[in-house]
Amino acid sequence: AQKVTQAQTEISVVEKEDVTLDCVYETRDTTYYLFWYKQPPSGELVFLIRRNSFDEQNEISGRYSWNFQKSTSSFNFTITASQVVDSAVYFCALRQGGSEKLVFGKGTKLTVNP
Amino acid sequence: ETGVTQSPTHLIKTRGQQVTLRCSSQSGHNTVSWYQQALGQGPQFIFQYYREEENGRGNFPPRFSGLQFPNYSSELNVNALELDDSALYLCASSSGGVSGNTIYFGEGSWLTVV
């Protein structure tokens, strides 16, 4: 079975603070893919990153960074110097190799206050 | 802009009616998936179409059905609407069927059943 847990339901920070969104996944496969998506109030899921199970290198893209640790089955997402425009619901998702579907966590609602 | 377009963006239907939602996939993508997102939840996989064939299905009843056309656009049909079908319906586009390629989402169709 595959499962994604985002334990933080809501997070509220003040602009310029750093914030980390947690994601823990469960899968029996050795080949799998992890994703993060951002969902603003408009509803569209905006792709942020894809990582395959064989690549544990952390990644940084501007103010965004991701920490993938297979030993703890975690794929955490950090926003540095948060901005009001970062306010959204963020979803972590898992896709097993050979599977047609994404399994999503319940999402973390991030509010960045000015 | 993901290149995935959905229509209509909002609609209201009465219980028992039928609805058709439409999706145009990103250029070059031959795989379309549909997801249902209830309020406050993560998206749930409905089914996937790859080269005009249903390629996998989630835990949804047969009154949820779909089509994929030769140009890879797709329709989601829901018959005998129930109040619980009220949700955001997201279309997702990718290439290669069950490969681990990135999945891009449209802005969704908000369905309200009254």
Image: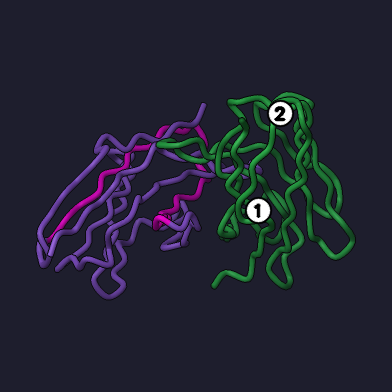
Chain colours: A purple, B green
For mark 2, does the 10 Å Cα neighbourhood hold few (<14), some (14 to 19), or many (20 or more) residues?
many
Secondary structure under the numbered disc 2 in the rendered image: loop
Queried whether the magenta region covers residue B45, the answer comes back as no
Q: Residue B65 appears in which quarter of the rendering?
A: top right
Q: Residue A15: where, in percent of width, then height?
A: 12, 65
Mark linked to residue A68: none
Query: What residue is drawn where x is 31% and y is 66%?
Result: A59
Q: Is residue B59 above or below residue A49?
A: above
Q: Please identify, in this view, whether the residue under mark 1 or under mark 2 is nearer the observer.
A: 2
Query: What residue is drawn where x is 77% and y is 31%?
Result: B17
Pointer 1 residue: B99
Q: In this view, does A69 lie above or below B71?
A: above
Pointer 2 residue: B81
Amino acid type at image mark 1: Ser
Magenta residues, start to end: A18-41
Query: What residue is drawn where x is 29% and y is 46%?
Result: A109
Report in which chain the residue with disc 2 lies.
B
Amino acid type at image mark 2: Leu
